[in-house]
């Protein structure tokens, strides 16, 4: 009788990495739906395109690294990266923008560091930051929500085929000019001499179109709450991101409401919610302990506010996340939990420093 | 109502308890063969009391406990012992261990047994011993001998007794059924434990997934006079872990590395309580237990009352096992249990469950993926560790970091592995890391023991050598005595030579000196203690001094007179000795003065005066010596030159010392700098004179002059100068950078220093050239070179250590330090090479040089030994006090010992060489004699002091006496040396005959 011999435990929760990743993908669906509803087919096309590219690059790299391709593809991590990047890109981003982005994310930011679990930076955010720095025009040409395109008729987004043509270069960009505009963050940044109050009244995207962003953010929150419920991640990082951002923006808004945007605006436009629930919670590149995640989130929230308010870029989530990724190992050293039976937590790597 | 506290983490694996908790407990059939491992628990295995072929009765003791942590073993049924030897046992390793095998006879015949009538009438220790003899070990999992847990000492207060009924592992229902059916037994056991521990509160912790058991317990507790609470805790693995249950029920955490008893809590399993009841009330030892047989590969999943030693196969057969489906056989629960290699292993006291699982039920773990740092493990860890960090550290063999992240607080519950989405066998990594760390530490320990053994052996050999030496000396002394008496009888007829007179006078002078010293000491002591007979003592002192002076004068005259007849050489030697003595005294006084100054004691003035006086004396002695040397014709220029050379070297050393003192004084801005400067100058002058004298002597010598200018000191001078220049330069640069106004001045200083350095260099080079031109092979003084080398090595080591420390701490200066280390190493290499070259040269040139140095070497050796002893004592002290520096000190001691060994070896080598060159030694006769006399004086003095102390009953008397013995030994040695060299000893000048006034 040949009995198997193995080390305990002999039970395993059916808790595969692939399942975790699938749940994350599932949680992005509300956001994807909202994006598609308000900004047209672009995001969906981008996601599909980016996912194909990601799987392709992942497979190629696995081949190069002599790893079983199918086994590693089944963890869905590449697809998650691609989806998150595509959600962050402008809906009409050209095909080559996505291609460059996915290449950077999968090949450089992920596999050159050793693959899944070894990358110090969030791959999607590395790609986003690189694209933003390299192709500022393409990256800031955001689609207008359909309510602004024509006020009369119902759902007037660019048709699916036309969107395909826009993305893959079939249509001259001038055609889609009527479908593009500034984001609320851009609008508020480049409002000239207007106070925020005046800007809210006079700039169309703020006066009428802001609802689209609110809705998209709400959809991301839904996805995030779903993942929290599924215990895919803990509340620490998202709450501290949103909390610190809210507190900071409230403080400044109280002091000078004419110049600073209100906290609700900060929380509900741009990539705040996507960042808080889907990027800051990326386990690989964030801090380890619960305490560490809080510090990590606090840093991201603070940096988002600082870069948005005084920095040179329209949105700040990518840079904030990357900067905090850089600090994560350091945070880890000083945020070990207090172990059972110990009077206090240890710090640092060695000794009781 | 007791509040339930929460512990961090935990998981909810499928319980799978329903399968086996439906049926009542049934007795398992008596198997034909029982296998009883001698070691069924933590601690030492028991020692068999039976032989193969013995018939044993049920309940009979078949093995007795050995050591503190051990329990007895009993025959579970009647039968015959057929084998005592290795059999497969249930162990994670699948190993075999010594077992007693019993062929059962089916009669199940009990040995005569009865419970204690009134256990409360027994003393606690008797009762605890009873429990030990009844073979009771913890039945929860680890199987820790129960008596050890109950044996806490009278002053140990136990606030809370916790009875563990949580049974948090999936599948297992043995405790559940036990509680349902035998709650009265459990209560009875609890009463016994409570009697032993006298806790103020008893808590029974049970998970809320056992409602029937909870009801049974509550019913049982209702009628109990003890303060018992049944606390229902939420079902969560691992709430049955001891530490977790303590936290759940009391909110108290068991400190890391401690046991619950340290915080006034004792945990016992319900099964243990039941076993204690059976032992105490019925006299039944632990020979059976309840085992859950479950898993999809058996048809009947139930709990059986199983005799210890029954093989798994019997139980599986009794439960209808489908062997084809059996895929994994687990003893214990699925979370912490371990797999069995086969079912031919016996049930032991800790076997609470046997899971016969099919492949579908417990499939092999899927291949592990990369850790994605998801942190789920951290969320479930009941010990609040960072499992994924530990995983990285264990994987990367960064055990220091793993230890720092509290690896050893891991209870290996398996919760992290259970939840890991990447299916990483985390617990396995931790076990491996722990084992590796333990092995490392064990090896370290082993090395430590080896070192201790080696040292003990060395010490023993040393002792033997010393004893041998003593015996040899005793023999030699006797021989010398015989010779001396012969000589005396022969020399009586001869006219008394001037030398004899001198000798007598010398002895007289020595005696006078000793007396003087004694008087002086007494006087000082009296002064210190403020005695009233001060004046008297002073008078005595003065008298003694006069006498001593007179004796000395006489001696000197006699010696001078003797010079006319005898050759100049011995005279010079005597003078030299006198000068040396004066010098030694001066040095002693100087150091005393320094010590006094440092301590700020009074009487400094006096000491200073003494020093001055001694200085004058030393100078006078030196002068006399110099004069004497200058006067006589160079009868033996070679010897002279050597002496001169030594003198020059001594002067140089002095100069250096003075320079150092001056520097120190300058640095600290204390002390009389002017005076020191003057002294330095004086010494410089002296050095020049001596050197000149030496050189002249060398040139004037009839022997082929070897202008062997000692390059080493020159080189040293040069190096020193260079170091100074560099230091000053750096300081100047720093100052310049900071824009200090003193920068200019400093720069000037640097230039000046550089000038000096050039000078020194030139001198060195000149000397080198000269040496080279002469073509002679200068007997280069190895000692300074060696010293240089050692110093350099020490520096290198120190710097290296510093650099390593810096590197470990990741300081930015580490690189720089490393560079510095390399530089130092380079210097060391240079020094070593120089030393080796010199050695080679010397060896080639002069084989007999070392004989002269013998005494010096001996002194070195003795000093080293003293150091070693001192350091050793300090280290031992530190070890006893458990100071953290003890290790370091020990290392230092070893180093010193190494040095001592070296010194000894050098000395012995030199001695061997010296033996060949007897003639050289003979020349030293007088010197040896002086040594001997000095030693004698010391002995006498010490003896008096010791006697004094003894009379006064001082506590130091013993020590002093030991010191006297030591001194006597030295004297004997000196005498021996003297005799060996051909001298004669005055019969009355024995150290034993102490001259007491």
Image (cartoon, grey):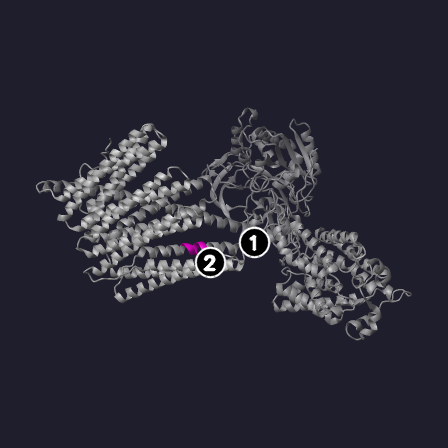
Could you tell me which residue is drawn at 30 percent across and 47 percent down? B859
Do we see residue B321 in this rendering? no
Q: Quadrant of residue A96?
A: bottom right
Q: Residue at x 78, y 55 (%)?
A: A221
> Where does label 2 land, which residue?
B746
The picture quadrant where one finds residue A145 is bottom right
- Mark 1 neighbour class, 10 Å CA radius: few under 14, some 14 to 19, many 20 or more: many
Protein chain holding label 2: B
SS for callout 2:
helix
Q: How many marks?
A: 2
Q: Chain of mark 1?
A: B
Residue found farthest to the right:
A152
Q: In this image, A54 relative to B608: left or right?
A: right
* Marks 1/2: CA–CA distance: 56 Å
Q: Is residue B12 found inside the magenta-colored segment of the image?
A: no
* 1 and 2 marks on the same chain: yes
Q: Position of residue B55 (x, y in %)?
A: 48, 36
Residue at the far left: name it.
B493
Is B98 or A170 nearer to us in this picture?
A170
Magenta part of the chain: B794-799
Looking at the image, is mark 1 or mark 2 nearer the viewer? Answer: 2
Q: Residue at x 35, y 60 (%)?
A: B715
Give the numbered dot on residue B394. 1
Mark found first going from the N terminus, 1 or 2: 1
- Let me know if residue A242 appears in the view: yes
Label 2 near label 1: C-beta < 8 Å? Answer: no
């Amino acid at each position: 009788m040949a009995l198997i011999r193995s080390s305990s435990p002999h039970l395993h929760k059916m808790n595969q990495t692939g399942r975790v990743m699938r749940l994350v993908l599932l949680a992005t669906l509300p956001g994807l739906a909202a994006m598609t509803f308000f900004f047209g087919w672009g995001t969906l096309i981008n996601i599909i395109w980016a996912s194909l590219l990601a799987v392709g690059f992942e497979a190629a790299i696995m081949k190069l690294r002599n790893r079983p391709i199918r086994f590693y593809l089944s963890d869905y991590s590449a697809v998650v990266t691609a989806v998150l990047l595509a959600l962050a890109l402008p809906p009409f981003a050209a095909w080559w923008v996505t291609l460059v982005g996915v290449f950077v994310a999968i090949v450089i930011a992920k596999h050159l560091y050793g693959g899944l679990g070894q990358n110090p930076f969030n791959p999607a955010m590395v790609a986003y930051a690189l694209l933003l720095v390299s192709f500022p025009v393409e990256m800031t040409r955001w689609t207008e929500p359909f309510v602004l395109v024509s006020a009369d008729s119902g759902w007037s987004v660019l048709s699916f085929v036309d969107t395909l043509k826009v993305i893959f270069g079939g249509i001259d960009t001038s055609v889609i000019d009527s479908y593009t505009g500034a984001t609320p963050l851009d609008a508020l940044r480049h409002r000239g001499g207007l106070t925020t109050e005046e800007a809210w009244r006079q700039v169309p995207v703020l006066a009428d179109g802001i609802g689209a962003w609110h809705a998209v953010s709400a959809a991301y929150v839904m996805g995030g709450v779903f993942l929290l419920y599924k215990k895919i991640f803990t509340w620490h990082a998202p709450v501290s991101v949103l909390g610190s951002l809210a507190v900071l923006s409230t403080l400044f808004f109280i002091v000078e409401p004419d110049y600073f945007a209100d906290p609700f605006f900060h929380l509900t436009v741009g990539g705040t919610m996507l960042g808080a629930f889907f990027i800051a919670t990326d386990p690989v590149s964030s801090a380890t302990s619960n305490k560490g995640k809080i510090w990590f989130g606090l840093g991201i929230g603070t940096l988002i506010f600082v870069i948005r308010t005084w920095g040179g870029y329209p949105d700040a989530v990518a840079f904030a996340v990357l900067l905090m990724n850089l600090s994560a190992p350091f945070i880890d050293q000083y945020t070990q939990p207090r172990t059972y039976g110990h009077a206090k937590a240890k710090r640092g790597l060695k000794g009781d420093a | 109502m007791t509040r339930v506290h929460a512990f961090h983490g935990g998981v909810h694996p499928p319980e799978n308890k329903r399968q086996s908790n439906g049926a009542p407990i049934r007795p398992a059939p008596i198997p034909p063969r029982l296998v009883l491992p001698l070691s069924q628990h933590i601690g030492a295995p028991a020692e068999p009391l039976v032989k193969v072929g013995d018939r044993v009765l049920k309940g009979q003791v078949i093995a007795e406990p050995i050591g503190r942590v051990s329990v007895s073993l009993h025959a579970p049924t009647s039968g015959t012992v057929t084998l005592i030897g290795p059999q497969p046992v249930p162990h994670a390793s699948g190993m075999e261990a010594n077992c007693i095998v019993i062929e059962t006879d089916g009669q199940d015949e009990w040995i005569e047994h009865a419970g204690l009538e009134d256990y409360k009438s027994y003393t606690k220790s008797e009762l605890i011993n009873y429990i030990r003899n009844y073979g009771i070990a913890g039945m929860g999992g680890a199987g820790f001998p129960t008596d050890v847990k109950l044996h806490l000492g009278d002053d140990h207060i136990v606030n809370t007794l916790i009875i563990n009924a949580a049974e948090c592992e999936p599948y297992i229902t043995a405790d559940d059924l036990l509680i349902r059916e035998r709650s009265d037994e459990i209560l009875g056991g609890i009463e016994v434990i409570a009697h032993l521990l006298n806790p103020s509160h008893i808590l029974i912790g049970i998970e809320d997934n056992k409602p029937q058991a909870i009801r049974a317990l509550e019913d049982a507790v209702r009628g109990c006079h003890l303060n018992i609470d049944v606390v229902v805790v939420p079902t969560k693995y691992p709430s049955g872990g001891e530490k977790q249950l303590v936290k759940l029920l009391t909110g108290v955490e068991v400190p890391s590395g401690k046991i619950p008893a340290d915080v006034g809590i004792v945990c016992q399993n319900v099964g243990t309580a039941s076993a204690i009841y059976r032992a105490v009330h019925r006299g039944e030892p632990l020979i059976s237990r309840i085992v859950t047989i479950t898993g999809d590969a058996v048809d009947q999943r139930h709990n059986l009352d199983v005799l210890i030693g029954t093989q798994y196969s019997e139980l599986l057969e009794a439960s209808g096992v489908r062997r084809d489906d059996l895929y994994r056989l687990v003893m214990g629960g699925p979370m912490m249990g371990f797999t069995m290699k086969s079912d031919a292993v016996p049930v032991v006291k800790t076997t609470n469950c046997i899971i016969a699982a099919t492949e579908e039920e417990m499939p092999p773990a899927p291949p592990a993926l990369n850790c994605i740092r998801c942190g789920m493990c951290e969320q479930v860890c009941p010990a609040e560790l960072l499992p994924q960090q530990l995983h990285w550290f264990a994987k990367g063999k960064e055990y220091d970091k793993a230890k720092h992240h509290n690896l050893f607080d891991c209870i290996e519950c398996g919760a992290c592995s259970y939840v890991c989405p990447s299916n990483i066998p985390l617990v396995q990594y931790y076990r491996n890391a722990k084992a590796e760390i333990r092995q490392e530490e064990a090896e370290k320990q082993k090395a430590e023991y080896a070192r201790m053994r080696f040292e003990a052996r060395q010490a023993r050999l040393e002792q033997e050598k010393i004893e041998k030496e003593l015996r040899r000396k005793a023999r030699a002394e006797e021989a010398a005595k015989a010779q001396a008496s012969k000589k005396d009888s022969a020399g009586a007829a001869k006219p008394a030579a001037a030398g004899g007179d001198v000798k007598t006078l010398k002895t007289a002078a020595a005696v006078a000196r000793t007396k003087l010293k004694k008087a002086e000491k007494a006087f000082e002591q009296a002064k210190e203690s403020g005695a009233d007979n001060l004046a008297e003592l002073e008078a005595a002192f003065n008298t003694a001094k006069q006498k001593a002076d007179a004796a000395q004068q006489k001696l000197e005259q006699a010696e001078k007179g003797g010079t006319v007849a005898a050759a100049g050489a011995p005279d010079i030697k005597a003078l030299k000795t006198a000068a040396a003595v004066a010098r030694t005294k001066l040095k002693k006084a100087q150091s005393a003065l320094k010590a006094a100054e440092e301590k700020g004691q009074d009487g400094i003035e006096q000491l200073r005066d003494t020093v001055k006086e001694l200085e004058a004396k030393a100078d006078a002695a030196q002068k006399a010596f110099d004069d004497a040397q200058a006067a006589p014709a160079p009868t033996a220029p070679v010897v002279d030159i050597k002496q001169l050379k030594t003198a020059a070297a001594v002067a140089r050393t002095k100069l250096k010392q003075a320079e150092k003192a001056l520097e120190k004084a300058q640095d600290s801005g204390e002390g009389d700098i002017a005076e020191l400067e003057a002294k330095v100058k004086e010494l410089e002058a002296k050095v020049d004179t001596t050197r000149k004298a030496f050189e002249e002597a060398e040139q004037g010598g009839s022997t082929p002059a070897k202008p062997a200018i000692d390059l080493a000191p020159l080189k040293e001078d040069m190096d020193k100068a260079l170091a100074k220049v560099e230091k000053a330069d750096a300081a100047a640069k720093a100052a310049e950078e900071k824009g200090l106004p003193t920068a200019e001045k400093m720069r000037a200083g640097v230039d000046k220093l550089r000038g000096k350095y050039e000078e020194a260099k030139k001198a060195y080079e000149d000397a080198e050239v000269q040496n080279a031109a002469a073509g002679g092979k200068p007997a280069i003084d190895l000692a300074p070179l060696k010293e240089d080398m050692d110093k350099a090595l020490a520096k290198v080591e120190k710097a290296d250590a510093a650099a390593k420390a810096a590197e470990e701490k990741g300081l930015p200066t580490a690189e720089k330090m490393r560079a510095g280390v390399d530089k130092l190493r380079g210097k060391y290499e240079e020094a070593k090479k120089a030393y080796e070259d010199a050695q080679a040269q010397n060896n080639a040139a002069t084989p007999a040089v070392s004989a002269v140095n013998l005494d010096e070497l001996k002194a070195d050796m003795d000093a080293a030994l003293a150091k070693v002893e001192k350091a050793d004592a300090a280290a031992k002290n530190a070890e006893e006090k458990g100071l953290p520096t003890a290790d370091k000190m020990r290392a230092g001691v070893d180093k010193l010992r190494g040095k001592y060994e070296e010194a000894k070896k050098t000395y012995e080598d030199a001695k061997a060489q010296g033996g060949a060159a007897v003639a050289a030694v003979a020349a030293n006769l007088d010197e040896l004699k002086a040594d001997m006399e000095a030693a004698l004086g010391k002995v006498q003095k010490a003896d008096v002091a010791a006697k004094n102390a003894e009379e006064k009953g001082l506590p130091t008397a013993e020590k002093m006496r030991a010191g006297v013995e030591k001194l006597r030994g030295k004297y004997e040695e000196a005498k021996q040396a003297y005799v060996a060299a051909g001298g004669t000893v005055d019969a009355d000048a024995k150290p034993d005959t102490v001259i007491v006034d």
